[in-house]
Image (cartoon, grey):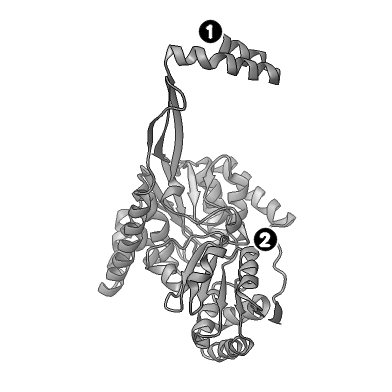
Amino acid sequence: MRTLKKAKERTAEENRQLRDTVTGIIDRVRAEGDAALHELGEKFDGCRREHLRVSREEIEAAKAKLTAQEKADLEEALGNIRAFAEAQRGTISELGDFSPKPGIHLGHRIIPVSSVCCYVPGGGYPLYSTALMLIAPARIAGVARVVACAPAVKGTDQIHYKTLAAMDIAGADEIYVVGGAQAVAAFSYGTEEIAPVDMIVGPGNQFVAEAKRQCYGQVGIDMVAGPSEVLVLADGTGDPEVVAADLLAQSEHAPNAKGLLVSLDETFARDVMKAVEAELAELPTAGIARQSWETYGEVMVADSLAEMAAYANDCAPEHLELNLQDPDTLIPALHNYGSLFIGENTAEVFGDYASGTNHTLPTVRAARYTGGVWVGTFLKTVTHQRMTKEASRKIAPLVKRMAEGEGLAGHAEAAGKRL
């Protein structure tokens, strides 16, 4: 593997100062409740709301600001997301009666979590697409209480109207104007105005990610997400400008986003680098995208498809694009990615918004051990068993011997009582 452009090493997001800061915020929210949320909201966002929960009047006012096209776009994208979530739900089935031995009846049920908070980040952009991606699969899973939250637009008391409208259209039961680590703490432990939930899902900045890490256990989480990333694998048969556009689409997310290209053709790789510079000269978000690309962008040339696949599996990217003439030949060798985009026609940004798959995906190599948010994120598989008296008596001696072997006399006695 030859490197044409080297990325700066991206270290883990957490550090002692970040951990201590977030711990302090969580402790304040637990001790002071709503008072802490109001003070922190004003400090970080300039928000001075009297009530954190958004009223129906505010929601309707936000939806009234949408153009007919904007509303239609939200509904069409939501339709695709719901349809895919429903199809995924159909693949998850209950196990009613399995018998490893006569008289032993085993099974499992699929039960949705009772409540979830869908955290929609604010940051520099109104990420209303995230509201659809989080709320829709939770609704399809059957979660009884689906709550949404987002920080106020800086210097205001309101969530961005497009985000607020998307939250309602997607089906949120409650919406709150609160963000940051304090939001994670509030929905984990509860305050006077906010009832706690069983799970928190959604991306956020490093403070949100660290708060989810610290509150995990008190509350369930989807994952601890880091900066966005895309890896493009190319054989040189595609369009350099298309690949450049896909790399910059990720780079504009944040200064620490990461765009990577591995090509079998060095000329193609260099053409992509030229195309990146050409697009940056005109891109409205070039301030962020250039910083990200120059710091974390990486371009490499591989000698073979096997080397390319090995690199991809080690990288375990959030988004993996196959800009290959025959992508199907490589797919069986790929097993670490958040979501796969097959062929030049399949832009990663399609998945970001409207094709139907979820865009809340594992980052920073977490794809080695988990996938992204999906309808199953909100479902629990819980087992049960039932035995006849005869089956109980047959298995009891086995269990008694095993318990005695571990030195657990009480376990052995419980089994022995069935004899």
Relative to residue 219, is residue 2 drawn left or right? right
Find residue 192 and report its horizontal and vertical position in percent: 47, 41
Q: Within the image, what quadrant is residue 136 found in?
A: bottom left
Closer to the chain start, of discs 1 and 2, is 2
Relative to residue 170, is residue 284 drawn left or right? right
Q: Which mark is residue 13?
A: 2
Which type of secondary structure does the marked residue at label 1 adopt?
loop
Q: Within the image, what quadrant is residue 158 found in?
A: bottom left
User: Which residue is drawn at the image coordinates 46% and 59% (left, top)?
Assistant: 120
Relative to residue 53, is residue 264 drawn left or right? right
Q: Is residue 356 above or below residue 172?
A: below
Q: CA distance from mark 1 to mark 2?
A: 56 Å
> Can I make out residue 54 in this image?
no
Q: How many marks?
A: 2
Find residue 407 and report its horizontal and vertical position in percent: 71, 17
- Looking at the rendered structure, the kind of residue marked 2 is Glu
- Looking at the rendered structure, the kind of residue marked 1 is Leu
Q: Which mark is residue 419?
A: 1
Q: Which mark is residue 137?
A: none
Which quadrant does the N terminus fall into? Answer: bottom right
> Can I make out residue 148 in this image?
yes
Which type of secondary structure does the marked residue at label 2 adopt?
loop
Q: Is residue 327 above or below residue 19?
A: below
**Of the pair 107 and 253, the residue shown nearer to us:** 107
Q: Within the image, what quadrant is residue 334 found in?
A: bottom right
Q: Residues within 10 Å of mark 1 (few under 14, many from 20)?
A: few
Find residue 172 and report its horizontal and vertical position in percent: 35, 52
Circles 1 and 2, Cβ within 8 Å, touching? The answer is no
Find residue 204 and report its horizontal and vertical position in percent: 54, 60
